[in-house]
Image (cartoon, helix red, strand yellow):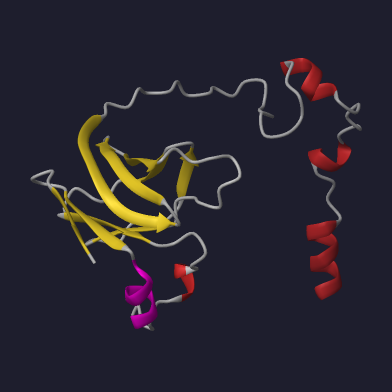
């Protein structure tokens, strides 16, 4: 009986099995795209980008000395419906051979993704939910690995707090910023 069931399920040729071989590179030629991430079917519609509306809040707050002789300045925080953009600078301007870079942890009173996109003097994160009131930015020396210093409940441990240079708290409702240790 099992043999008959297996033959019945497997033995029926499907249209996919009857299809002939597709010439290598054919579908790429048809849509004129190189293979890879840009690969789409010929009838796929790529949605148009919707422009983000950003509101920028100037800060110009000196976070402190993050590396020998270099201070980190929090320039601004910009918010859109989906993203939060943190803009920063080093003073004096970072020399090419300088061992200094942004080492920061981002969170809010309602958990958000820590994934980010960084380029030059800014870092873009997912915006905290509209119900959130605060966003926190913790700053560390470039050589400190803060990612391994959370307790079982997800809170920063004592080593994390001891090595933190400063915390910038941004009130998402009043748009005020304050720093603390």
**Measured from the top left, where is residue 156 in percent x and y?**
34, 75
The picture quadrant where one finds residue 10 is: bottom right
Q: Quadrant of the C terminus?
A: bottom left
Q: For residue 63: magenta?
A: no
Residue appearing at x 58%, y 40% in the figure? 96
Q: Name the residue located 32 percent from the left edge and 27 percent from the top edge.
A: 52
Q: Which residue is painted at 31% across and 44% down in the image?
A: 73
Query: Magenta region's main secondary structure?
Result: helix
Identify the image quadrant of residue 25: top right
Does residue 141 appear left or right of residue 58 in this picture?
Answer: right
Q: In this view, does 123 lie to the left or right of 174?
A: right
> In the displayed structure, would residue 166 be above or below residue 72?
below
Q: Residue furthest left?
A: 174
Magenta stretch: give its range.
Answer: 158-164
Decide which of 42, 175 is in the foreground and name it: 175
Above-or-below relation of 150 to 87: below
Residue 90 image offset from top left, x and y in percent: 40, 43
- Residue 51 x, y percent position in the rendering: 35, 22
Q: Is residue 145 something that shows in the picture?
A: yes
Farthest residue, direction front: 69
């Amino acid at each position: 009986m099992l043999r008959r069931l297996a033959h019945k399920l497997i033995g029926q040729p499907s249209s996919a099995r009857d299809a002939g071989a597709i010439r290598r590179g054919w579908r790429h030629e048809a849509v004129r795209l190189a293979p890879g991430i840009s690969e789409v079917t010929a009838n796929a519609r790529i949605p148009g980008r919707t422009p983000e509306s950003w509101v920028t809040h100037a800060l110009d707050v000196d976070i402190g000395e993050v590396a020998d002789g270099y201070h980190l300045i929090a320039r601004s925080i910009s918010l859109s419906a989906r993203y939060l953009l943190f803009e920063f600078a080093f003073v004096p301007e970072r020399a090419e051979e300088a061992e200094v870079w942004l080492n920061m942890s981002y969170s809010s009173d309602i958990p958000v993704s820590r994934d980010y996109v960084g380029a030059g003097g800014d870092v873009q994160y997912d915006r905290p939910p509209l119900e959130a009131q605060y966003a926190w930015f913790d700053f560390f020396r470039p050589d400190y690995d803060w990612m391994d210093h959370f307790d079982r409940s997800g809170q920063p441990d004592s080593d994390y707090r001891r090595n933190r240079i400063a915390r910038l708290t941004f009130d998402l409702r009043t748009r005020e910023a304050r720093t603390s240790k």
